Image (cartoon, rainbow, N blue to C red):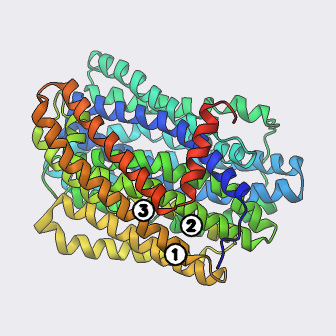
Amino acid sequence: MEIQTNASTTTQVAKSAGSVGIAVFFSRILGLVREQVMAALFGAGFYMDAFVVAFRIPNLLRDLFAEGALSAAFVTVFTDYDQKKGQEAAWRLANNVLLTLTVLLSLITLLGMIFSKEIIQVMASNFGRTAGKIALTQLLTNIMFPFLIMVSLAAAVMGMLNAKGRFFIPAMASTFFNMGSIVGGVLCAWWAPAFGQPPIVGMAVGTLIGGILQLAIQLPSLKRSGFAWRPHIGLKDEGLRRIMILMIPAVIGLSATQINIFINTNFAARCAEGSVSWLNYAFRLMQFPIGIFGVAIAIATLPVISRQASQGDIGALKATYVSSLTMAFLMTIPASFGLAFLAKPIIRLIFEHGRFTSIDTLHTAEALAYYSVGLFAYSTIKITVPVFYALKDTKYPVISSFLAVVTNVLFISLALDAFQHKAIAFSTSITMIINFVFLSAVLYKKVGGYDLRYLIGAFIKITLASLAMGLLAYYLYPIIGQIMDQRVLLNQIISLMVAITLAVLVYFVLIRLLGIKEYQEVLGSLKRRYSGKI
């Protein structure tokens, strides 16, 4: 089967993904700085474990209701309204969604704060074995819970802007979250002891400041897109009902990762103290390539696929899906091998400062290597699941999510005693791969097939090129390390950058020789952006 697409569709996705990718890159860099600050100030242990669990509670709900289910469902319906009913109807729907969402999330936040202790006892029951750990986690949870409202509204606004073809500012919004978290958090951490509170409380306040900034930075762009705030609630509104119909099962369909994170937190709390922090630092690092490549491509693809589904152009939809997956493979598979082979020097360079010890580096690197196995699956699921929503089918994402959760629990239960936190990281990767394979197979049947031969061929070629890249980096880094004293921070940076740069150059040479056409689209997008043509 030939790929039924034209160069303009693939280029459109590549251009939009490039725009988002650059914005997300700055956000992820600041995200790493935030994690570095946390590692240096608090290391991996009592305070950091409490913060991770406290932040994870509202963040889990954010991912379930906002950046996952709401974004996918809202963009699908909003795009359909904009195409068929006009801008006025689309903006009226947007006002209805924003106000309804504010009321609903305010209620959820209030209930979450009231029952925060009970939630913590379910999520991390073993915290009770350490004096004061549950009480501290409860305090941090109550401070950060309103973050759910701010960041969910920010996600809804991002969906509106994406549907209008605006990608850069929404993608930059999380940069302002990180800025608020770092600057506001450090200042509040410095002031916290004056109020009789530990410094980690200040970092919780900084998280709330970051959430406010993430919403505020998008509002001017939303206004320029034609939006005007006209408070309106209509629970019987057809558009809102359609969003809810898509969203309720989508909460489950897009939540395999988040449900597993909840379960994994409970398992991690049973391991050695610091395990929650090690897994968190490793997962945050893995989110760097997922955000730059996987999420960027998914955000750029969703409006295109939603429009193609609305117009009934299934041939174009299939071609866009195959091309988007190939671009995701092209960028995330080499990232997987790079993180796996260079996990320890990367962790040591980024985090091993202040209270973060060499033991923490070793255990975090172990988690990162196992997490990286499923990196490509994380990214491709973010592309695949919204296709089902665009086709108005939410059944199979629900089934897939259930399958992933059951597999995760069984795997960890069997391996936790022997492998501790490493079992949790590896199980997360395995379940994501199973989730992706299941969904892509179902979609293949549902749309009458897509160019599977091209997709599998590209996957194999990219994997082989990535393996060669990873092995080169793995053996090259210690050779460089023998030349340069690794006790000096600058030498660590130079050694790692030289090894990575040479390995990446080899990878792209191999990809070009292997004839992956999306390679040209990605490079073309970057060239146009940096030459000022976009």
Could you tell me residue 108's position as x and y percent? 53, 50
Q: Is residue 399 above or below residue 473?
A: below
Q: Which residue is mark 3?
A: 462
Question: Which of 502/283 is in front?
Answer: 502
Q: Residue at x 17, y 71 (%)?
A: 415
**Residue type indicated by callout 2:** Val
On screen, residue 327 versus residue 258, left or right, reads right
Element type at mark 3? helix
Q: Residue at x 31, y 60 (%)?
A: 467
Q: Residue at x 87, y 47 (%)?
A: 87
Question: Which of 243/195 is in front?
Answer: 243
Could you tell me residue 472's position as x and y percent? 25, 51
Task: Work out whether mark 2 precedes mark 3 in sequence or the reverse, and give the earlier one.
Answer: 2
Residue 491 visible in the current orientation? yes
For the residues bearing labels 2 and 1, Cβ distance under 8 angstroms? yes
CA gap, disc 1 and disc 3: 21 Å
For the residues bearing labels 2 and 3, Cβ distance under 8 angstroms? no
On screen, residue 191 versus residue 147, left or right, reads left
Q: Looking at the rendering, in which quadrant would you find the C terminus?
A: top right
Question: Which of 455/211 is in front?
Answer: 455
Rendered image: mark on residue 439: 1
CA gap, disc 2 and disc 1: 8 Å
Element type at mark 2? helix
Q: Which residue is mark 2?
A: 385
Answer few, some or many: residues within 10 Å of disc 3's Cα (few below 14, many 20 plus, some between 14 and 19).
Answer: many
Q: Nearer the viewer, mark 2 or mark 3?
A: 3
CA gap, disc 2 and disc 3: 23 Å
**Residue type indicated by callout 1:** Leu
**Residue type indicated by callout 3:** Ile
